[in-house]
Image (tube, helix red, strand yellow):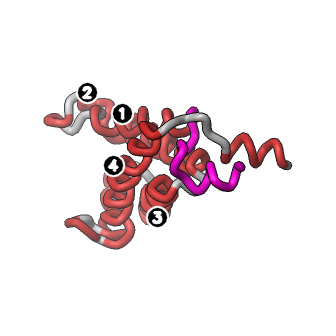
Amino acid sequence: MKTLTNTVLSSQAGYGITLLRILVGIIFVAHGGQKLFGLFGGYGLEGTGQWMESIGLTPGYYLAMLSGAAEFFGGLALIVGLLARPAALALTFTMLVAIVKVHLANGLFMSNNGYEFALALMAASLAILIEGAGKLSIDNALAR
């Protein structure tokens, strides 16, 4: 069990990944807040669930709750650096689903509702998944 805990929590990454983790975490918290609570002009669970149903993602309300929770709570985990790798895994999967189910058919660029932004967030999540939370994190403190 100790080996698994060290694998999840330890990180040799420096301050760069810490900066990436915090900034990407803020973006995810904001997007999750839109889905869950209707913050920042979002539609909340009801509206997001209805939209998901309209594009064939069912059950929409449940999937809105799952994706919103992954983004909001995963983003919080990234910001504070607690369980950053599991959070990054959930966020990577969430962005993969968003790319394939929502944005891929529109091409790369955001101007056409493409997958550019989701791909950048997925790349950042993958970097955190691989490198860990970095020097300034609760994970790193617990691993010591």
Label 1 to label 2: alpha-carbon separation: 9 Å
The answer to whether mark 1 and mark 3 are in CB contact below 8 A is no
Residue 132 horizontal/vertical position (percent): 57, 40
Label 2 to label 4: alpha-carbon separation: 19 Å
Q: The disc labelled 2 sits on which kind of residue?
A: Leu
Q: Crowding near pointer 2: few (<14 within 10 Å), some, many (20+)?
A: some
Which callout, 2 or 4, points at the residue further toward the start of the chain?
A: 4
Q: Crowding near pointer 1: few (<14 within 10 Å), some, many (20+)?
A: some
Q: The disc labelled 3 sits on which kind of residue?
A: Met
Q: Crowding near pointer 4: few (<14 within 10 Å), some, many (20+)?
A: few
Q: Residue furthest left?
A: 111
Residue 65: assigned label: 3
Task: Point out the stretch of residues depicted in magenta.
Answer: 130-144
Q: Secondary structure at mark 2?
A: loop
Q: Residue furthest right?
A: 1
Q: Single out the mark in the foreground, 1 or 2.
A: 1
Residue 127 horizontal/vertical position (percent): 49, 33
Query: Which residue is denoted by mark 1 in the rendering?
Result: 119
Query: Which residue is denoted by mark 2 in the rendering?
Result: 108
Q: Single out the mark in the foreground, 4 or 3.
A: 3
Query: Which residue is denoted by mark 4 in the rendering?
Result: 55
The answer to whether mark 1 and mark 2 are in CB contact below 8 A is yes
The answer to whether mark 4 and mark 3 are in CB contact below 8 A is no
The residue under the point 51% across, 39% down is 128
Front-most of residues 121 and 58: 121
